[in-house]
Amino acid sequence: MNPCRWKGVLFDLDGTLLDTAPDFIVVLNAMLTDRGRPPLPADDIRAVVSNGARALVSLAFGGHPGEAGFEALNVELRDRYSRHLAVHTHLFPGLDDVLARLERGGTPWGIVTNKPSLYTLPILDALALRARCASVVCPDQVTHTKPHPEPMLKAAAELRVAAADCIYVGDHERDIAAGRNAGMATVVAGWGYIGAGEDTRLWRADFHVDSTRELGELLFAAT
């Protein structure tokens, strides 16, 4: 068994490590149904999940932050979601094997997300992942969020690995920028919540993988 090519591996959460979209789809479409509006296609919601709750509100109801009624919808979405955590959310297929292989080889892994601790930690507990990872960095634990390098450097320190010896896996341009800003290797998770027509090659990641199987091949390739 080949060891991991990096001394530490970090993951974005939504759309990279976990498929959280199914729970957002249920919650957002329930809000629409309650108002007599037709539900949105699942793929439309999935493509926006990584941009956060406000982006989902804009998708479903139009409008922008600061406009009348927008924040009330945002609060409602967050409240409903907090009561629907990890109902349908799961690891992307194949990633449990990747994590297990990292653990067997003694390579620490962690999570750097822009999802607040209020939601992140209960989800990780529900999926029995929190005790397995060496670091979980959420936006409420730092002064600056991705794409700033601060959360990346905090996670590397908690892994007790130099940033230059880590690789960060993400499905959004800000993930790749954050990893690069911290001096880490970066890889685009092609299975993630990437908008239609978005050219991920422009993100300037070090690697691109289209499946979790390809990620495993990259991490454990013979050097």
Image: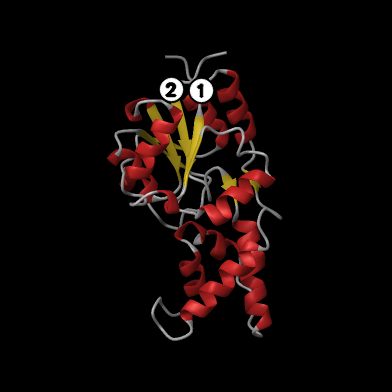
Name the quadrant containing residue 21.
bottom right
In the image, residue 144 sits, relative to residue 24, either above or below, namely: above
For the point 62% across and 35% down, the residue is: 131
Q: Which residue is mark 2?
A: 7
- For residue 107, say whether it is visible: yes
In the image, residue 58 sits, relative to residue 218, either above or below, namely: below
Name the quadrant containing residue 186.
top left
Residue 92: give x, y in percent of width and height: 61, 42
For the point 63% across and 50% down, the residue is: 122
Residue placed most toward the observer, 119 or 205: 119
Residue 42: give x, y in percent of width and height: 61, 63
- For residue 60, say whether it is visible: no
Please, what is the three-letter code of the amino acid marked with disc 1? Thr
Quarter of the image containing the C terminus? top left
Viewed as shown, does residue 215 lie left or right of 84?
left
Quarter of the image containing the N terminus? top right
Q: Which residue is mark 1?
A: 107
Residue placed most toward the observer, 152 or 5: 152
In the image, residue 169 sits, relative to residue 120, either above or below, namely: above
For the point 60% across and 32% down, the residue is: 132
Q: Are marks 1 and 2 in contact (CB under 8 Å)?
A: yes
Q: Secondary structure at mark 2?
A: loop
Crowding around mark 1 (Cα neighbors within 10 Å: few <14, some 14 to 19, many 20+) is many
